[in-house]
Image: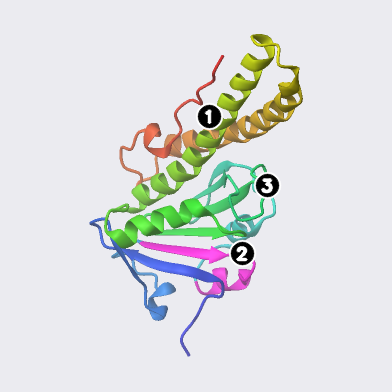
Amino acid sequence: MMATVAGVIHALQLDGTGGASALPPEQITSSSHTEPKWLHLDLNELQPEQLQNELGLSPTTVDMLCAEDTRPRCVQAQEGVLLNLRGININPGAEPDDMVSLRILCQSHRLISVRKRRIYSVLDVTTQLHAGNGPKHIDELLASLTKHLTHRMRDLIDQLEDQTDLAEDQLFEKGDLSVSERIYPLRTQLIHFRRYFAPQKDAILALISLKPDWLRKIHALDFGSAPMPHKG
């Protein structure tokens, strides 16, 4: 009987030229290192024991991929590098400051990502792959996922900063007291998102400092980890 893995959202094989194709079910659990694979899994349907039995992951790695603690961090594990990242929740009806998380195990031949809620940055990358202009290798795939997550967060922070600046201008330069009640929640959101951005940047820099064999000479900027701009 063919082994299967529950909770597979997509299983792709990168073609090395920017495209990808769906992996046949029998190849999802294959240990072949010939072509890079991306397995994207739904934590809500995942069966942790299958990650051990079918994908060959250690209990410690499985625990980290399935953990409730999703703070951004980077850890060297037995099988590869574990990376927790967070992004903006833009699912319908969601509050933006209710962050979504992406748990990643990255190896030379395979990237396994696990999520609990839909992450649109993942959809961005899969769209690029299906169009033939996506990442070519595992390190580029990781960089692309990280960059999309980070850029969405930075775009929202830029918008909040612009709104805060405008409200403060109206208050201090024009004496418009009606905007004063908008400033506090805007600043609160800014503090919230910056609090998440700093450890995410630290996690990415920690990944680069580990210098795993599969990580080629990609600059920190390729991971979207440039310093956060601050206005005023």
Question: How far from the left and from the top, in percent, is residue 107?
Answer: 42, 55
Give the label on residue 95, or none.
3
Determine the residue positioned at 64% across, 67% down: 44
Location of residue 153 by image quarter: top right
Q: Please state the extent of the stretch shown in magenta in the rendering.
A: 37-54
Name the residue type under label 2.
Answer: Leu
Name the residue tied to disc 1.
158
Front residue of 71/194: it is 194
Determine the residue positioned at 48% across, 60% down: 112
Q: Residues within 10 Å of mark 2 (few under 14, many from 20)?
A: many
- Identity of the residue furthest to the left in this view: 17
In what quadrant of the picture does the C terminus appear?
A: top right
Q: Is residue 52 magenta?
A: yes
| 6 shown above or below 126 | below
Name the residue type under label 3.
Answer: Glu
Q: Earlier in the sequence, mark 2 or mark 1?
A: 2
Q: Tag count in the figure? A: 3
Spatial distance from mark 2 to mark 1, Cα to Cα? 31 Å
Give the label on residue 19, or none.
none
